[in-house]
Image (cartoon, rainbow, N blue to C red):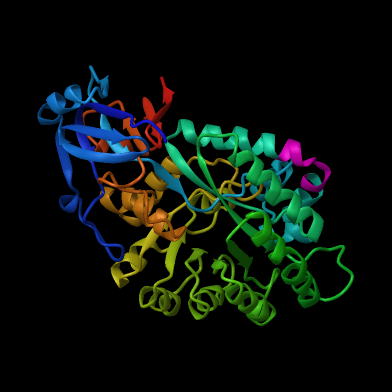
Amino acid sequence: MQPIKHTLIGPIRQAVTMANLPLKGGIKDEQLEIIPEAGILIKNDRIHQIGSYWDMYPEAQSIGAEIVNLKSDFVALPGLIDCHTHICFGGNRAKDYALRNAGKSYLEIAKSGGGIWDTVTKTRKASLEKLAQLTIQRANRHLKDGITTIEVKSGYGLSVEEELKMLRAIKQAGENTHADLIPTCLAAHIPPKDFEVTHRNYLKAITDEVFPILKEEGLANRIDAFIEETAFTPVDIHSYFQKAKEMGFDITVHADQFYTGGSQVAVDFGAISADHLEVSGEKEIEILATSDTIAVALPGASMGLGVPYTPARKLLDAGASLAIASDWNPGSAPMGDLLMQASVLGTFEKLSNAEVLAAITFRAAAALGLQDRGQLTPGLIADIVLFPTDDYREITYQQGRLKPFKVFKKGTEVLKV
């Protein structure tokens, strides 16, 4: 039986709990619960109590709790959550970036041999062990930025063997980093150039040969697909997603990045999230707002490609749930700085601090189907980030330059500056 360990953190100038906030629609800063001079008492890997540090201190001493005594001003947030990344990959696409800045479009570059297929080639050349090592390095960089839960997609293998290699590498990486890695199978990223028959036959090979192994080895419980004219159409993907649902997988969709149609597919199949949405119009916004599918904005892709941002303000005003993720990938979003990207999106889309922070904490958790994190409340996982400031508004104001001083993952301190 595991011995019980108690840890008390405090006094914290402001603990921003993200509790008692709606999953959908806009949020005003005045709705945030902010506990001054707070203490957070952790029991093993869960938050046991949160409240006044000075009220909790005597009890903590009496039970022999470890005291993490903060001698400077700090703001506590729940561990940040990045619900859409592609950090398992080989090589880079610096050439693509230079070509885009010189005037070539994303689709033009892809058609000329760059784009996703370039990364597929480089990822296939990398061993499972190398991919795991690279994924660990990127996850640990995220962890230093206060991101304690990271979704990681496959999708640069595009064959039965190579997709499984990627997902096994993601699993191995998850066993060797303090961050929680949430794997997603994105075998339906683009049609592989070297698959000799139709797109639908490729998808059938994935459903027949990969899906059962995902279940057997516990490699992923999430299935994603890129719905675009240059990837897979709504018609192409219908039987693929139908099979995924029959087998009990959660569905998520790359939707409305260059052309509309993906958000309708997401809602039709009860997808947990629809991600990108840069070209979503009034029809798509209404579809998402009246569904349970969470809209995920990826401002890093807009920055990397020089295209408009997801209409985040309109989505929230219509009543949708909005998460924000980095889309960290080697092509369209190489920066991988979630807090900076979310802060900048807030500036352009006029999002309140509460809306930005919700989008990278509990709403991002919901986009991954996780109910055990994203808020500083008793019973949830003790993922806690301490920023060196006395005012939580500094976190978005400094647009990512303010870095965490301490990060706790499941109650264990994993970063101390």
In the image shown, does 187 or 340 lie closer to the viewer? 187
Q: Taken as a whole, is the magenta stretch helix, strand or loop?
A: helix
Which of the 4 image quarters holds residue 414? Answer: top left
Left or right of 48, for residue 302: right
Q: Residue furthest top?
A: 71
Residue 276 in sight here? no
Q: Residue at x 25, y 62 (%)?
A: 22
Figure check: 103 above or below 269: above
Q: Is residue 317 magenta?
A: no
Figure check: 386 above or below 313: above
The magenta segment is 123-131
In the image shown, does 314 or 415 lie closer to the viewer? 415
Which quadrant holds the C terminus?
Answer: top left
Q: Residue at x 36, y 43 (%)?
A: 381
Query: Looking at the picture, how far across and down is residue 279, in whole percent?
Result: 51, 68
Which of the 4 image quarters holds residue 242? Answer: bottom right
Which quadrant holds the N terminus?
Answer: top left
Q: Residue furthest left?
A: 55
Which of the 4 image quarters holds residue 321? Answer: bottom left
Figure check: 336 above or below 354: above
Q: Residue at x 72, y 55 (%)?
A: 116
Q: Residue at x 43, y 47 (%)?
A: 81
